[in-house]
Image (cartoon, rainbow, N blue to C red):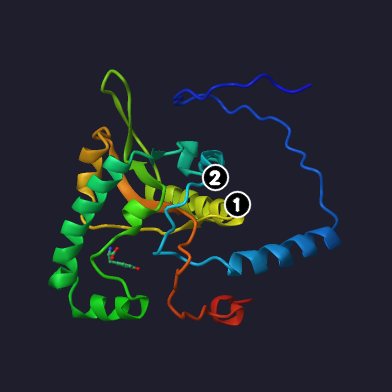
Amino acid sequence: MTEATRTWTPTHGDPYRGVPYRPARIPAAESLARAAELRERMDERRTVRQFSTDPVPEQVVQDAIACAATAPSGAHQQPWTFVLVKDPEVRRRIRAAAEEEERVSYEGRLGEEWLAALRPLGTDEVKPHLTDAPYLIVVFQQRHWLGEDGSKRKHYYVDESVGIAVGMLLSALHLSGLAALVHTPSPMRFLQEVLGRPANEKAFAVIPVGYPADKCEVPDLIRKSLDQVLVEI
Ligand code: IYR
């Protein structure tokens, strides 16, 4: 019998209550096959900066956000809000504000060392992806819980929690056949204003989502090999 759907409500100081967790064990051979397949598919993911304006099924994006929202989080506080921006006019406003900030950044605010690090990526202050991609997912981190009565409660490991959720979002989008880009305009304060988010939320990233443009190009990058990132002891 399936348990009736229960709705999350803010809790604090409740006693521990355990429930059985008995996922079926996958046979080793099946596990190996799945892992090898997943490794190959994940290696095909590329950050895309040239998007097609073609529409994508909204349900795919909604499902990917639902996947992201299953991420583990500090004290299970789930300190994230995903704003799905579909309105072209709002995307235009975000692009205009982001490009204004980026212009200042690329004209010197970043500094020579940072600009040199970015050179192989070919990025600049022009951000057509913010209006070409049919969706923007703007991820906000909730620095603390804000009750309707204005009461606050501290959130723990917010950066880590939201970072993990964004990783899961990118994986879900990629495995569902969509391209994405983690864009971090700096400063990002304007996003809170444009999207009317409450004071306890801080923008974490803007993620354009869609299909790559027909003429999409990506930088010729090389990933570190497994032995360059894995230390076995
Ligand atoms: N936020 C700027 C600059 C930028 C910074 C890093 I670190 C990147 O990996 C890519 C870009 C921009 O979006 O262009």
Q: CA distance from mark 1 to mark 2?
A: 8 Å
Q: Is residue 19 left or right of residue 162?
A: right
Which callout, 1 or 2, points to the residue nearer the camera? 1
**Residue situated in front as seen by the camera: 231 or 142:** 142
The residue tagged 1 is 176
**Element carrying mark 1:** loop
Tell me residue 178's x, y (percent): 53, 55
Is ligand 1 within 8 Å of the beta carbon of the residue shown at mark 2?
A: no
The answer to whether the residues at label 1 and label 2 have Cβ atoms under 8 Å apart is yes
Is residue 184 positioned above or below 40 on the image? above
Q: Amino acid at mark 2?
A: Ala
Which numbered marker is on residue 62?
none
Q: Is residue 149 left or right of residue 42?
A: left
Is residue 127 positioned above or below 194 on the image? below
Tell me residue 129's x, y (percent): 35, 58
**Element carrying mark 2:** helix
Other residues around mark 2 within 10 Å, as few (<14) / some (14–19) / many (≥20): many
The residue tagged 2 is 64
**Looking at the rendering, which quadrant does residue 233 occupy?**
bottom right
Which residue lies at the image location 16% right of the left edge and 57% below the top edge?
100
Tell me residue 73's x, y (percent): 49, 43
